[in-house]
Image (cartoon, grey):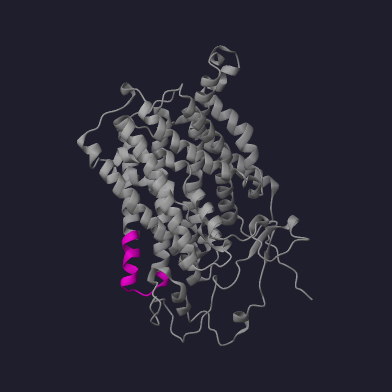
């Protein structure tokens, strides 16, 4: 008789577990003491032949037996319990979606990277200078590519099935706190940024479509930045954020990628048409190296962090191996690099020292194609904000109530507090570049440059292969500390450009 499928205590999801796997029942396989099997698919040291102990995993003393944790068996199939009955469990992933090939995995990862952060890439080049900006963009793309793959390696080493579980397994309670804070701060910062983008986009579009609306009672609110943020957030994003099933928003991903393509084409084609008086001026620092290198690192990092999705995408592959996942990551980060570089060069070389955190704000309000891009971007943010609220809420639920049953009251309280707090903060600031800088240089640095290599160092023997991980951790820590100091000094003492909300 088939054993019942277990359910989680505080979610209406069930896990399809494979209790018949041969390696589970083979007493000759010592999972804890032998991890040399990782070498067989390790893309970082991908030779046709491997020397035993090449990876240098602590405790790896045994023979050549392989104990696959993730690659040779399916990840748990997580589904809504209401959809479980009457379905075929084989090949089903979260939300009932089938397993994907390399193409769909590439699409999902590219969509995770090419998000709202791409709009700030011209601003990153302004902060760092053209030469240094291009160098940082390429270098950070390579580092992010490596750390995304490192998360999967860490998961194989630890036996954990999530980024959060891996960090917790390596560092216990302090690790759980660190990853929870980083994930929550990154998602909440994204919510603030999305509200700011909505306020930057929708009023321009309404004023262009209806020139006399500003003189119309009540309807004139649609051209007011703060009013639009409140109306759209409370009326659209907040109800969507109350969903428990994130799959209901899955269709928004295709629209999101399309809107990013529209924005890139708009900047590239409409930039040369901007009047000379609206364009800025170049200087030697702007051509070479400018003084805002750490701010630029934060903005670029905000755009490229998708590490929380990496294991989900890895598990979605029909044949989840490190080599196949590395192929997906290489192509995804490569395409994202091209897109970000095109956006950065197109925007920065047009507006130069006048480049804003949201480059669309540099264009005149009556440009039809730019207003179409603004509309696409604003609508995209309305449906993307609930996704970030979902992440924040899940982190809070997992941290504070890991074993508690679902509570509708707690769900509503968390969602309401998150959405309205993000909305309030977006009402008192409109400097999108500053938000990208701060969130990118703190939580994004932790997720991309500190925690993945730190876990690898923890689980691997000290050898030359851990040196890149140590360097990356040091780089992330330096960027985080200096950026925080700069942010505090800027707040306390003042300085920099003052961004006025219109």
Residue situated in front as seen by the camera: 46 or 224? 46
Q: Quadrant of the C terminus?
A: top left
The residue that appears at 29% across and 28% down in the rendered structure is 280
x then y, percent, for residue 174: 46, 61
Quadrant of residue 452 within the rendered picture: bottom left
User: What is the magenta segment's predominant secondary structure?
Assistant: helix
x then y, percent, for residue 457: 38, 68
Residue situated in front as seen by the camera: 101 or 413? 101
x then y, percent, for residue 246: 63, 49
Is residue 383 toward the left or the right of residue 468 in the image? right
Is residue 22 toward the left or the right of residue 177 in the image? right
The residue that appears at 37% across and 75% down in the rendered structure is 461
The residue that appears at 41% across and 58% down in the rendered structure is 145
Quadrant of residue 46 within the rendered picture: bottom left
Q: Is residue 165 visible?
A: yes
Residue situated in front as seen by the camera: 398 or 91? 91
x then y, percent, for residue 40: 46, 76
Magenta part of the chain: 458-472
Residue situated in front as seen by the camera: 160 or 254? 254
Magenta span includes 246: no
Q: Quadrant of the N terminus?
A: bottom right
Q: Is residue 172 visible?
A: no
Position of 376 relative to 23 (above/below): above
Residue located farthest toward the top when viewing the structure as drawn: 215
Position of 208 relative to 93 (above/below): above
Quadrant of residue 381 within the rendered picture: top right
The residue that appears at 49% across and 32% down in the rendered structure is 373
Is residue 290 toward the left or the right of residue 57 in the image? left
């Amino acid at each position: 008789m088939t054993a019942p499928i277990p359910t989680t205590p505080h979610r209406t999801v069930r896990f399809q577990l494979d209790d018949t796997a041969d390696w589970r029942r083979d007493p000759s396989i010592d999972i804890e003491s032998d991890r040399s099997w990782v070498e067989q698919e390790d893309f970082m040291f991908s030779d046709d032949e491997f020397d035993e102990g090449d990876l240098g995993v602590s405790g790896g003393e045994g023979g050549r037996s392989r104990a696959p944790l993730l690659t040779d068996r399916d990840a748990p199939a997580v589904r809504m319990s209401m959809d479980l009955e009457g379905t075929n469990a084989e090949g089903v992933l979260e939300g009932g979606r089938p397993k994907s090939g390399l193409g769909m995995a590439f699409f999902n990862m590219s969509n995770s990277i090419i998000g709202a952060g791409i709009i700030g890439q011209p601003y990153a080049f302004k902060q760092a200078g053209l030469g240094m900006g291009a160098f940082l963009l390429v270098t950070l793309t390579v580092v992010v590519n490596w750390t995304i793959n490192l998360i999967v390696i860490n998961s194989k080493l630890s036996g954990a099935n999530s980024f959060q579980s891996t960090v917790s397994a390596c560092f216990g309670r302090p690790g759980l706190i660190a990853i929870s804070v980083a994930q929550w701060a990154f998602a909440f910062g994204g919510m603030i940024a999305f509200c700011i983008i909505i306020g930057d986009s929708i009023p321009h579009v309404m004023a262009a479509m209806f020139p006399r609306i500003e003189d119309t009672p009540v309807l004139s609110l649609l051209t007011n930045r703060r009013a639009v943020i409140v109306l759209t957030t409370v009326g659209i994003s907040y109800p969507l954020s109350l969903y428990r099933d994130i799959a209901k928003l899955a269709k928004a991903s295709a629209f999101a990628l399309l809107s990013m393509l529209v924005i890139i084409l708009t900047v590239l084609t409409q930039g040369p048409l901007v009047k000379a008086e609206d364009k800025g001026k170049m200087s030697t620092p702007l051509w070479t190296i400018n003084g805002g290198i750490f701010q630029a690192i934060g903005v670029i990092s905000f755009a490229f962090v998708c590490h929380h999705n990496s294991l989900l995408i890895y598990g979605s592959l029909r044949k989840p191996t490190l080599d196949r996942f590395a192929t997906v990551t290489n192509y995804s980060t490569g395409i994202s690099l091209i897109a970000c570089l095109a956006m950065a060069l197109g925007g920065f070389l047009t507006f130069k020292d006048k480049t804003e955190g949201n480059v669309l704000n540099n264009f005149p309000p009556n440009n039809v194609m730019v207003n179409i891009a603004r509309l696409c971007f604003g609508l995209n943010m309305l449906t993307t904000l609930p996704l970030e609220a979902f992440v924040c809420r899940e982190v809070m639920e997992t941290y504070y109530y890991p074993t508690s049953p679902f509570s509708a009251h707690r769900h509503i309280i968390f969602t309401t507090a998150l959405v309205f707090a993000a909305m309030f903060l977006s009402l008192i600031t409109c400097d999108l570049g500053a938000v990208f800088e701060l969130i990118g240089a703190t939580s994004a640095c932790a997720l991309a440059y500190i925690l993945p290599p730190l876990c690898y160092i923890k689980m691997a023997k000290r050898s030359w292969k851990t040196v890149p991980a140590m360097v990356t951790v040091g780089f992330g820590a330096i960027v985080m500390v200096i950026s925080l100091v700069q942010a505090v000094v800027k707040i306390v003492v003042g300085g920099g450009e003052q961004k006025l909300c219109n």
